[in-house]
Image (cartoon, rainbow, N blue to C red):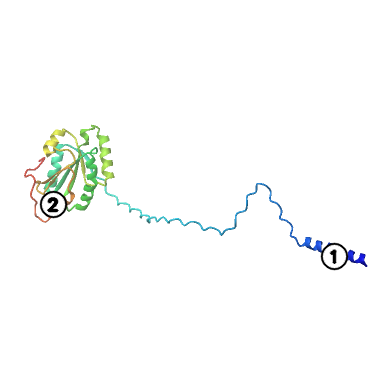
Amino acid sequence: MKDRGVAGMALALLLGLACARASIPPPAPAEPAGTPPAAPATAPSRPALLPRTLHPPPEPPAAPLPPVPAPEIRFTDLAGLRRELAALRAHNRPVLLNFWATWCGACRVELPLLGDLGREWGDGGPAILGVSVDLFSIPDEDLIKGRVRQMLASHRVSYPNRIVRGDQHQLYDAFGIAAGLPFSILYDGQGTIVRHYVGAVAVEEARAIARAMAAGSAPSASAGAEAGG
């Protein structure tokens, strides 16, 4: 009986040890050497908001300017220029006579303004007559005529232009050109000088004078004699 009791106790002890070993969790597998620790889980980050660049709306393309008639260009001399002025005077029409050259920077600024003024005056206002003195610097008529034509076209000038041959000093003396180009003379319908323009024409003043002449109120003349006549 005593031996059975000892044997029973030994069996019970063995069963208890087996149950305790089964309840212990197995160890976690070891990570290989050199593996960095896992980063803690975090919420996904939101992208940074960049400032919005505001662009102005594109400007509409400029409407193409309407074409202008090609100007009448021909060669003349001092006598021919005087005859042309006399013919305009016979029709009692005021005349703006403009001396210029393709090499003159101030003339290139003035030409489009006179081109607009010529279209504004039309056939009912003062005539504009351009006089190129380019032939004095380069004695090649074909070359100069091409340059003059190109310059007038690029600045939308449609009023007549003349290229003067002959002695530069006679032309300058006849019209009182003493201070370079551009140089202009505004005549009334009788051929009397109303204004000299040394440098660019004062367009607003020329408009006012033209209105006064059309209304029969002649402005005071800057010189009482006819130039070039």
Crowd band around label 1 with a 10 angstrom C-alpha radius: few (<14), some (14–19), many (20+) = few
Q: Please name whichever residue, 46 or 147, is drawn nearer the observer in this view of the structure.
A: 46
Q: Secondary structure at mark 2?
A: helix
Point out the image quarter for the N terminus: bottom right
Q: Quadrant of residue 102?
A: top left
Residue plotted at (25% across, 36% down):
144
Residue plotted at (78% across, 62% down):
20
Q: Secondary structure at mark 1?
A: helix
Q: Nearer the viewer, mark 2 or mark 1?
A: 1
Residue type at mark 1: give it. Ala
Residue 143 on image: x %, y %: 27, 35
Q: Please name whichever residue, 192 or 141, is drawn nearer the observer in this view of the structure.
A: 192
Q: Please name whichever residue, 74 or 44, is drawn nearer the observer in this view of the structure.
A: 44
Which residue in the protein does label 1 denote?
12
Which residue in the protein does label 2 denote?
209
Q: Residue furthest right?
A: 1
Looking at the image, residue 60 sits to the left or right of residue 139; the answer is right
Q: Earlier in the sequence, mark 2 or mark 1?
A: 1
Number of on-image labels? 2
Residue 93 on image: x %, y %: 13, 50
Q: CA distance from mark 2 to mark 1?
A: 136 Å
Residue type at mark 2: give it. Ile
Residue plotted at (22% across, 48% down):
113
**Residue 138 — which label?**
none
Residue plotted at (89% across, 64% down):
6
Image height check: is 192 above or below 26?
Answer: above
